[in-house]
Amino acid sequence: MYQQDSFGQAFKRGWLMMPPGIRWIITINVAVFVIGMLGGRGFSIFLNQNFGFFSEPYLTFTQPWRLVTYMFLHGGIFHLLFNMLWLWFLGRIVEDHIGTKNFLTIYFGSGIGGALVNTVVTSVFGGALIPTIGASGAVFGIMVAFAMLFPRYKLMLIFFPPIEARFIVAGLIGIDILFLSASDNIARIVHLGGAFWGFVLLKMWYRGYNYDAWLTAIGEKLRPKKKAPEMRGPAGAGKKSKLYAVDDAEILDEVEQDELDRILEKISKNGYDGLSAEEKRTLFELSRRN
């Protein structure tokens, strides 16, 4: 007998099926927005003033956390929906293709880069010192990355026929350029700066800069080192053994070679596109070591 899932079960399943980077970015953004609404207008103003980004060099230097926290604040439900829907629709495909750590590097790099570009422009040309909030700069970076990875992917927009991703993203960037001088309280420089850094960071990824490997290496260095196991027994009591490390290295090499052989065999049968995102990352890391 067929039993239909409840809304809660369907929502939970859909939430768990999202890539982890997208899942937590959207969850935190929505949670912060709800908390701001429950706290009232005064609390929202407090959040914007203390965690929004001000395009002022001194504040950027002395309060660098604003470069990240401003991306989790939004001015209204439509502002939030616009960013999160674009991020969900395009970002999950990007994350599946390049991996979570590479995706997060481009997302936060674009958001931070867009804010810094806005700081430079404001310092040179002047502007009102008001808080900048929203994930638009980061989202624009992901949109540019998507258009570079899948330029001919056709997107469906309301009231429009299917349009290739490269034209839609180029059109959105063009709109921001046309309305740069408009006094509509939209941080268009942040959008353009985020788009620029999305382009740069993905271009670097194409050229072999593996942010996943960088972040993993940094994590390994920060992780406390474990002491080598000691030999037990009369002959080796109190002495550290080097035999375990040698054996582990040999076993690791054999496992990596077997994994590489399996992936290469899969490529010969199904082609490179037949690999999963995890297999592509593994192939990239193993090829750099060999």
Image (cartoon, rainbow, N blue to C red):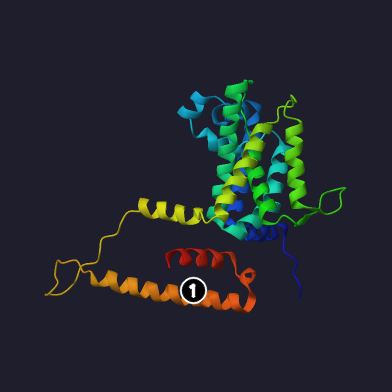
Res 34 quadrant in image: top right
Vertical position of residue 81 compared to residue 116: above or below: below
**What residue is rendered at 52% in x and 56% in y?**
208
Percent x, y of residue 180:
72, 29
**What residue is rendered at 19% in x and 66% in y?**
240
Q: Which sits in the foreground, 268 or 43?
A: 268
Res 114 quadrant in image: top right
Vertical position of residue 154 compared to residue 121: above or below: below
Quarter in which the N terminus is drawn: bottom right
Instruction: Please give the residue where the numbered disc 1 appears in the rendered image.
Output: 260
Task: Please say whether residue 34 is visible from this viewpoint.
Answer: no
Badge 1 amino acid: Leu
In the rendered structure, the answer to whether residue 147 lies left or right of residue 64 reads right
Quarter in which the C terminus is drawn: bottom left
Task: Please say whether residue 4 is visible from this viewpoint.
Answer: yes
**What residue is rendered at 71% in x and 47% in y?**
86
Mark 1 is surrounded, within 10 Å at the Cα level, by few (under 14), some (14 to 19) or many (20 or more) other residues, namely some
Q: Which sits in the foreground, 286 or 51?
A: 286
Q: Which sits in the foreground, 13 or 96?
A: 96
Mark 1: secondary structure = helix
In the rendered structure, the answer to whether residue 247 lies left or right of residue 236 reads right
Percent x, y of residue 271:
63, 73
